[in-house]
Amino acid sequence: MEQNEDPEHGVMMEHTSLQSLQIDPERSRFPFCIVWTPIPVLSWFIPFIGHMGLCREDGVILDFAGPNFVCVDNFTFGAVARYIRIDEGKCCVYRSDKDYKQDESGTDALTMTWDGALKKGTQEYQHLSYNILTCNCHSFVANNLNRLKFRNGGWNVVNLAAMIFLKGQWVNKAAMVRSLVPSIVVFGIGLYFGGATFLTFWALFTFLLVGWFLLGTYCFSNLIHL
């Protein structure tokens, strides 16, 4: 006996599935995206430094927010300002749990689903202490991208920060203003009252911070956790 399928139900399910894959900033949903937002005070002085997270298939944001704590669906420093949509085709993952269960080949090329990879990363970082210099939100995202084999892996805190800074898409104009205006104000005040002295201390601080991550990433491989 054949079962009759409800065409309206099929259309509704397809619409719901497509809707779940759409970026919706109002609901903080960014499926398959890397997301970024400025950190108060720190980002005012160094605009390219901020807080980062990675999103599940349904768009829910995961971010390493503190010792033994991965925040779910509550981005730590506020609304997303910039994002990059990840091309699934450049990751070695199964498209769905169904495909994962049906594959009996035992191949290592496709290791898990997108959400399965993020779940493993979350479980790992729930047992790690947070340190802004050695084990931070960028480490969490890089760790997951390497597990997903995005562009064959090799991700770290430096190239990840460079990618979001150079290629990150602004959510809207308000997000751009919220991210950049505080830096402009701080620099204006600093230059007005401090002049060259302010600029010298800013350059020194930026050099030391960026230098730390460059050395920790490319010269001392075990210094920064991935």
Image (cartoon, rainbow, N blue to C red):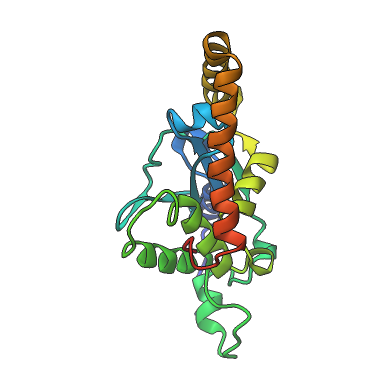
Is the residue 62 above or below the residue 166 in the image? Answer: below
The residue sitting at the bottom extreme is 105
Is the residue 161 above or below the residue 43 in the image? Answer: below
Q: Residue at x 43, y 28 (%)?
A: 41
Image quadrant of residue 67? bottom left
Q: How many marks?
A: 0
How far across and down, in percent of the image, does residue 222 sit? 49, 68
How far across and down, in percent of the image, does residue 43 sit? 50, 31
Is the residue 170 above or below the residue 35 in the image? Answer: above
Visible in this render: residue 108? yes
Image quadrant of residue 177? top right
Q: In the depicted view, which residue is nearer to us: 16 or 174?
A: 174
Q: In the depicted view, which residue is nearer to us: 115 or 196?
A: 196
Q: In the depicted view, which residue is nearer to us: 195 or 158?
A: 195
Visible in this render: residue 177? no
Is the residue 63 above or below the residue 223 in the image? Answer: above
How far across and down, in percent of the image, does residue 91 sit? 64, 66
Q: Residue at x 65, y 37 (%)?
A: 169
